[in-house]
């Protein structure tokens, strides 16, 4: 990372919110559901699917969960009414996982039932390591109840992930495989880029050999190329997997994958909680420091 990039990333908390917003708007669809609908329609027109995500996590009052719950349920009606090719992602902590796990489960269950009735799908997102066990337990509970229209996320940087995959495969698995973004202890997470890559590759092979449907979520050319090789080795049909990318990231590579005939889904976040999400994205992509510098000094 260059000195400029380090300085800008370090200074993010004091950079005016409006400046961050100018740069970060490439990562979010907007603040409202209609903003997200417009973005998804545009992606669908370019033969890309979407996952809509109402931003926010770690609510501090259980009363907040009701508003989030209503917002997510409204997304499914909007997807149906607009005939969008999109599913929905939910973060358990935005529905009260850390405050009341059982109430959180029941809220997500209502969402999963609605999605099933509308022939749609729910991705239960994975958050920091303090929530991993609770989130995986929730997923297993849904599977035992007979729900198949939902999936989980596995983070390749966690040392536990191979053991988790081995267990989850027994009950059937639809998984989004990503590297992981939270700042975890070296005791539980790989920190070296190559270690994370190698674990990602190993997990992908486990998942494909185990019959899982995998959302191959990465912007890393090394991992994309490895995934394509593994898919070819297994002569997999294009309806047996998909690639996934974040809105605003690696758009040229995204287009190349679609042109090559691969299914591709774009994560489309929106909502009033855009600032926390955007600053996290910027910290993950420090080369964006140049764009922040331009926004600060170029008019």
Image (cartoon, rainbow, N blue to C red):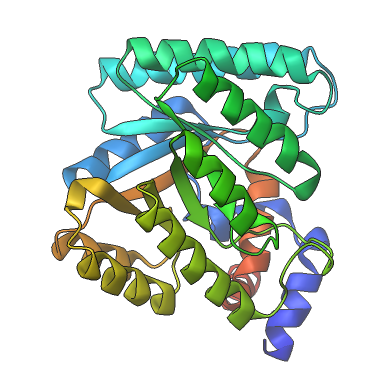
Quarter where residue 191 is shown: bottom right
Quadrant in the picture for the C terminus: bottom right
Is 266 located above or below residue 292 in the figure?
above
Q: Taking the image as drawn, is residue 47 in sight?
A: no
Q: Is residue 183 left or right of residue 193?
A: right
Depth check: give the residue in front, 259 or 289: 259
Residue 100 % position (x, y): 81, 18
Is 61 located above or below residue 273 in the figure?
above
Name the residue: 81% across, 44% down.
Answer: 130
Name the residue: 74% across, 48% down.
Answer: 128
Q: Is residue 155 left or right of residue 224?
A: right
Name the residue: 14% across, 59% down.
Answer: 261
Q: Is residue 233 left or right of residue 21?
A: left
Depth check: give the residue in front, 29 or 170: 170
Depth check: give the residue in front, 65 or 20: 65
How many callouts does the rendering have? 0
Name the residue: 42% across, 79% down.
Answer: 222
Depth check: give the residue in front, 1 or 158: 158
Residue 70 % position (x, y): 57, 12
Residue 66 % position (x, y): 68, 11
Residue 254 % position (x, y): 30, 63
Q: Taking the image as drawn, is residue 179 in sight?
A: yes
Quarter where residue 99 is shown: top right
Quadrant in the picture for the N terminus: bottom right
Is 103 located above or below residue 31 in the figure?
above
Q: Is residue 245 left or right of residue 297?
A: left
Quarter where residue 103 is shown: top right
């Amino acid at each position: 990372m260059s000195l400029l990039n380090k300085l800008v990333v370090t200074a993010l908390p004091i950079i005016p919110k409006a400046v961050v917003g100018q740069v970060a708007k490439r990562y979010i669809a907007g603040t409202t559901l209609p903003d997200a609908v417009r973005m998804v329609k545009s992606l669908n027109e370019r033969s890309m699917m979407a996952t809509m995500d109402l931003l926010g996590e770690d609510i501090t009052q259980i009363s907040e969960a009701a508003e989030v719950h209503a917002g997510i349920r409204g997304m499914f009606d909007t997807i149906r009414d607009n005939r969008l090719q999109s599913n929905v992602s939910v973060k358990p902590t935005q529905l009260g996982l850390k405050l009341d796990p059982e109430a959180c489960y029941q809220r997500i269950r209502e969402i999963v039932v609605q999605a099933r009735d509308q022939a749609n799908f729910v991705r239960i997102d994975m958050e920091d390591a303090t929530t991993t066990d609770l989130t995986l337990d929730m997923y297993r509970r849904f599977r035992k109840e007979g729900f198949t229209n939902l999936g989980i996320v596995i983070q390749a940087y966690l040392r536990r992930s191979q053991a988790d995959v081995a267990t989850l495969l027994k009950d059937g698995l639809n998984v989004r495989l990503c590297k992981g973004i939270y700042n975890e202890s070296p005791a539980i997470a790989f920190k070296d880029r190559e270690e994370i890559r190698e674990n990602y590759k190993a997990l992908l092979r486990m998942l494909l050999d185990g019959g899982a449907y995998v959302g191959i979520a990465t912007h890393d050319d090394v991992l994309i190329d490895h995934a394509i090789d593994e898919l070819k080795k297994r002569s997999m049909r294009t309806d047996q997997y998909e690639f996934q990318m974040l809105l605003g990231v690696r758009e040229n590579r995204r287009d190349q994958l679609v042109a090559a005939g691969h299914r591709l889904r774009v994560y489309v976040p929106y909502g009033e909680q855009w600032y926390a999400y955007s600053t996290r994205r910027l910290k993950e992509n420090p080369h964006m420091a140049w764009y922040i510098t331009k926004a600060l000094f170029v008019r």
